Amino acid sequence: MKELGYYGFEVSDLQAWEKFAVDVVGMTIGRKDEKTLSLRLDEHAYRLVLEQGPADDVTFLGFDCGTDENLDALIQRLQQAGHSVEDRTGELAARRLVNRIAVVEDPLGIRVELFVGPTIAEAPFVSPVTKSGFVTEGLGAGHAVLVGPDRDALVNFYTLLGFEISDYIKQEVAPGVAIEFAFMHCNGRHHTLAFAGAPFPKRIDHFMVEVRDSTDVGLAYDRALDNGVPISRTLGLHPNDRMFSFYAATPSGFSMEYGHGGVEIGPDWEIAHYDHVSVWGHRPPAAEAPSH
């Protein structure tokens, strides 16, 4: 697996998402019609696809397999493990602007789109507000944290796609109650996917975009506040990927993490176990200041 090529969300309010993605995040519009909006982060034709609908959740994730040979090998591996894989080269490939595409469902029912040959946009990417640009080259669109009843089933499925464990976090959220996260990578990005086994109203907790300069994190934080976007987690630092970031609530209710400085996986990487999600910060806004 090469990288996470794109996110796909079904959203109830395309207009609110457009304002959030462009004015706060700093994306630009790729394509737009009454029921679909695609958004750019870099030279690719798009990295985020929004489709009109009631779910307000992740519906598909697109993974760039790099070569036809890699795609063929993944299809064979999935089929041998008992998964149904459908070749959608044709109408879906044309819609996604890729050369080939095959689809399979993960244990959460998310459509996994395995593709090769993404389209590079003719026009250069210039963010309206993010000056340093987004970190995507060789690392993909960012990361997604998925939540479901069976974390290990997700880990096992994505291992078939070539993902490997980066590390684990087990944090106590109440006396005797802990949430366990597994973080997985497919390239140098510390994690492209992470999974938590927990009851949750949506299949996605958050998705992440990374910028090249920490100043852009602060400026985005201010833009979120200025635009009335709820901050779901304040500025903070993670112990495992060392990402300096904050979380903002999207118009669909799940969060977006906006960060800088994530470490990259190298050949000598060792799997670690942590008992806390954040070194500092990342507090719910109500917990930002002590009451008197």
Image (cartoon, helix red, strand yellow):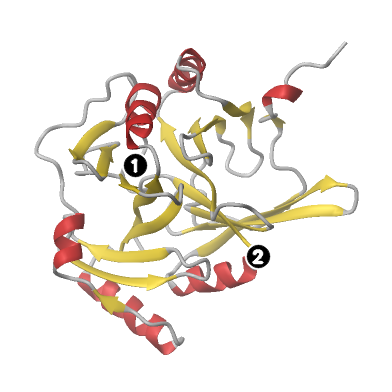
- In the image, what residue type sits under mark 1? Thr
Neighbor class of circle 1 (other Cα within 10 Å; few <14, some 14-19, many 20+) is many
Which residue lies under the disc numbered 2?
Answer: 149
Work out whether 110 lies above or below 20.
below
> Gap in Å between the C-alphas at discs 1 and 2?
30 Å
Q: Residue at x 31, y 43 (%)?
A: 137
Q: Earlier in the sequence, mark 1 or mark 2?
A: 1
Q: Which residue is mark 1?
A: 136
Q: Nearer the viewer, residue 155 or 284?
A: 284
Quadrant location of the N terminus? bottom left
Q: Is residue 260 visible?
A: no
From the viewer's perspective, is residue 65 above or below residue 174? Answer: below
Residue lying farthest to the right in this orientation: 175
Specify the quadrant of the image occupied by residue 186: bottom left
Q: Is residue 96 left or right of residue 200?
A: left
Q: Is residue 216 visible?
A: yes
**Residue 109: image location, x then y, percent:** 47, 67
What residue is rendered at 76% in x and 16% in y? 289
Q: Residues within 10 Å of mark 2 (few under 14, many from 20)?
A: some
- The circle drawn on residue 10 is none
For residue 64, above or below residue 54:
below
Which amino acid type is shown beneath numbered disc 2? Pro
Q: Position of residue 57 (x, y in %)?
A: 47, 50
User: Residue 78 appears at what percent x and percent y?
Assistant: 40, 81
The answer to which of 130 and 135 lies nearer the viewer is: 130
- Residue plotted at (63% across, 65% down): 151
